[in-house]
Image (cartoon, rainbow, N blue to C red):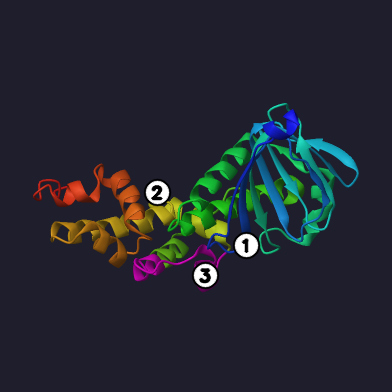
Amino acid sequence: MAGQRNDQRSVSAWRPRVPGVVEVFHAHYTEYAYPMHVHDVWTLLIVDDGAVRYDLDRHEHGTPHDTVSLLPPHVPHNGSPATPDGFRKRVLYLDASRLGDELIGPAVDAPDLRDPLLRRRVGQLHTALALPGDELEAESRLTFVGERLRSHLVPRHEVGAERRDPELARRLRELLDERVVEGIGLTEAAALVPAHPAHLVRAFSGAYGIAPHQYLMSRRVDRARRLLLAGHAPADVAGVTGFYDQAHLTRHFKRLVGVTPGRYRGSGGSSSSH
């Protein structure tokens, strides 16, 4: 019975507004073990504390701290704590629009990827997915995560040096300028331009020295500054400049201006010369 009393379980799950992401799942388990099961989507797993052992296609695997594990759809697997204190994990469930069925075989053969850069990028993606209103950033990060996963599974997909494409970058900037308030997703932008999403982001960043999502937030913050100095309340400004809510405005405003919208509004105009 003592083991039962020490068994701890906590989970958080949601579906973000990002194409290709079926679910985000964060969990902390101390003793719980998953039985054999399958998913109809891809499972992208990182472990922040502890470790997990699991069987995939009748072979045993593990998840050291610097590992990214990619479990393919339709292949049975289980999972249990590999350390006395259990494990804390973050999982993305991705549909076939992000990773195709042709990668299932390579993923079965090598599901655990030792790649510190990939591990860091997946962590950054989880951070973006947890912030409503930052879907363009999340979609951009997911595109590069998917590209790096494919380069591990099928090395011929590795991307070399991208050519500069200032015309493509200009067309994306025009799209962003047209949709400062309503925003635009990376998948939609890539279809309109058209271009591969990863190349589109690289072309824009190479041309302007800033990622598309950073450019969009900068434009929104500029509009917010003008409205705040005109006397509008931060809560009202957030809604008309494209931010998800006042907290979303405050986070990006403080990052770019150095003070909160409320302090900026009350500064009497002394901060507006920047």
Q: Residue at x 44, y 61 (%)?
A: 169
N-terminal label among 3 and 2: 3
Circle 2 Cα neighbour tier, 10 Å, few/some/many (<14 / 14–19 / ≥20): few
Per the image, the residue denoted by label 2 is 209
Instruction: In this rendered view, identify the residue nearer to me: 3 or 172.
Output: 3
Quadrant of the image occupied by residue 16: bottom right
Three-letter residue code for mark 1: Gly
- State the residue at coordinates (69%, 33%): 5
Q: Which mark is residue 20?
A: 1
- The N terminus - image quarter: top right
Q: Position of residue 168 (x, y in %)?
A: 47, 64
Camera-side residue of 169 and 215: 215
In this rendering, the label closer to the viewer, 3 or 1: 1
Q: Are marks 3 and 2 in contact (CB under 8 Å)?
A: no
Numbered range of the magenta stretch = 174-195
Q: CA distance from mark 3 to mark 1?
A: 13 Å
Residue 246 placement (x, y as % from top left) = 31, 56
Q: Does the residue at mark 3 contact the one at mark 1 (Cβ under 8 Å)?
A: no
Q: Element at badge 2?
A: loop
Callout 3: few (<14), some (14-19), or many (20+) C-alpha neighbours within 10 Å? few
* Amino acid of disc 3: Glu
- Decide if residue 14 is on the left or right side of residue 58: left
Q: Is residue 33 left or right of residue 229?
A: right
Between 135 and 188, the one nearer to me in the picture: 135
Give the percent coordinates (x, y) of residue 115.
Answer: 66, 36
State the residue position of label 3. 188
Answer with mark 3 or mark 1, whichever residue precedes in sequence.
1
- Label 3 sits on a secondary structure element that is helix
Residue 212 left/right relative to 78: left
Q: Position of residue 38 (x, y in %)?
A: 81, 55
Disc 3/disc 2 C-alpha distance (Å)? 22 Å
